[in-house]
Amino acid sequence: MAAVGERQISYDARGLAEPLAEAPRSAVVEDGVATFDARDLTTRTINLELRRLLYEEGVDEVVVQNPQGRHSLGVGILRRCKITFEGSLGYFACGLIDGPEIHVKGRVGWSACENMMSGVVVVDGNGGSLTGAALRGGDLVVTGRVGARTGIDQKGGTILVCGSVGSMTGFMMQRGRLIVCGDAGPGLGDSMYDGTIYVAGTVKSLGIDCVPGEWTDADTELIERKFRIYGLGSPPEFQKFVCGKVLYNYDSLEPAERKLVI
Amino acid sequence: MCGIAGIIYRDGAEHAIGDEMTRMLQSMKHRGPDSTGYALYGAPGNGALVMRYKLADANTPRDFDFEDRLRRHRFEVESRLAALGARIHEVDEETPYAFRVVFDYDGDLKLLADFVEDIPEAEVLSLGHSLEIVKDLGDAESVHEVYGLAKFKGTHGIGHVRMATESEVDIAGAHPYWAYPYSDVAVVHNGQLTNYFMWRRRLERAGRRFMSECDSEVIAVYLAEEMSKGATFEEAMRGSLDELDGVFTYIAVTKDELGVAKDELAAKPLVLYESDALVALASEEIAIRQIVDHEIDTYDPYEREVLVWQR
């Protein structure tokens, strides 16, 4: 194991990390695939290079080598393309994207694919907490395990976790599907409004207003289709959880309001 | 927000943990630019004790009498150590206000710490056979340079970058905290404790002292109290999950062990890397990648997990 101490983060007079940056233009394009090494680049220059290739050069496929767990990589990409990160990413990876097909050959940190609109993200390793927070659409597949509050505030799309998930998974989920092949921590689906959670392993405890749902053919079709697309073999048996809707009080009035109506 | 990090080598041999911890902490500067602290474990030098203490804060107003007072207080510390029968081997002046003393002493550590801290503005930062706590204002690289941590070799250590939310930005409020008066135990914490005042009053009645207004100090003192009642390090940490309220991920260390505990909501981050050679953990993977240059497999522990490793 070698030390990596030589590279230093540079700060400007105000103590801010590299305030102004330009795309390094270091990518090599071969057969329509652009490749660049992120080892000596900073978060900002990696993203600038990525955007330059995708928007200026019109490249459809980019390979980023040595991302080294840096934060906020691959965010805000709003076109169909293919991106491969050959290594782990840090916090806020691939957030706010609309369209790309991303393969992360490593892990992701907290809040991966936050507010993703469409596209596909496949993570080979584990995920941090808040994975797929406020996901709006598309597929997010994590091969390993993820931390707490996966799919918090999920508003659409599908999150598929091959390993286990931590506490408060699907917290305040509003729509979409959350498929967990491993075990789920305490407070599963706490305060969910709608959507469906599938768990193959054990559930430590259900959150408030999360109840077992009735299995239909549509559920079988969905699970089998997703497993087929991502080559995950034959699916295990899942339990289904939905919102019990006992917290639905949209039509009832507050005591003060009731007086006004009467 | 704060960032925490820890590293422990499984072979028990000495490594450049001063440098490695600095690289880990510097990469997390964005999590806490106010102050940086280290609790490092060197080789225990044939039974001698190492004490790190300070006589002023980095931002104490430098009045007319300041230097003279430091000189008098420093002399007072050394004469009080001698009065207790300690044989001083070496005294290092790390900064004008922070000192490192190595001495032989086989009496009561609480008595010694209390006697030193009775001197105005004196605070014992750490006391133990191999533990050394270094903390000061600024980022990791500046503390590393001022305190000459490049030459520090050891078996394990923890570190902290602080973004102050609950108390003053000064050395007293910086982590790690020594588990007064328990030798060789220290803690770094990321989070907030909501039953801090209850525990502080309870522990003060039990004879423990607090040197800051920082809620994290209560964890170190709590662990010391439980261990002095006979709990093992791991038992004390497990007990803290039920006894301490709030959100926390903390890393605690003894001369042979390094442990981490997470609250029941898993509200604060921690990334863990285990290999045959070492265990490294930090708030963000980017910190671990500063000391391991190849792709690694890391994961986030779940809620209410307590994990302990031996060196």
Image (cartoon, coloured by chain):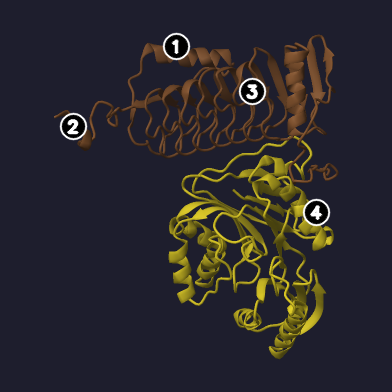
Q: Is residue A153 above or below residue A18?
A: above
Q: Which chain is yellow?
A: B
The Cα–Cα distance between marks 1 and 4, rounded to whole angstroms, is 55 Å
Residue shown at 42% from the left, 25% from the top: A197
Q: Identify the amino acid type marked 4.
A: Asp
Q: Identify the amino acid type marked 1.
A: Glu
Which element carries disc 3, helix, strand or loop?
loop
Mark in front: 1 vs 2: 2
- Give the labeled residue for mark 2: A260
Q: Earlier in the sequence, mark 2 or mark 3?
A: 3
Q: Is residue A207 left or right of residue A251?
A: right
Q: Are marks 4 and 2 on the same chain?
A: no
Taking the view exactly as shown, the residue that stands out farthest to the top is: A31
**In this rendering, does residue A86 appear at all?**
yes
- Give the labeled residue for mark 4: B19
Q: Is residue B204 above or below residue B299?
A: below
The Cα–Cα distance between marks 4 and 2, rounded to whole angstroms, is 69 Å
Q: Are marks 1 and 4 on the same chain?
A: no
Q: Earlier in the sequence, mark 1 or mark 3?
A: 3
Q: How many numbered discs?
A: 4
Q: Front-most of A223 and B242?
A: B242
- Relative image position of residue B75 (x, y in whole percent): 76, 84
**In this rendering, does residue B275 appear at all?**
no
Which element carries disc 1, helix, strand or loop?
helix
- Relative image position of residue A260 (x, y in whole percent): 18, 32
Dot 1: chain letter: A
Q: Identify the amino acid type marked 2.
A: Leu
Q: Identify the amino acid type marked 3.
A: Gly
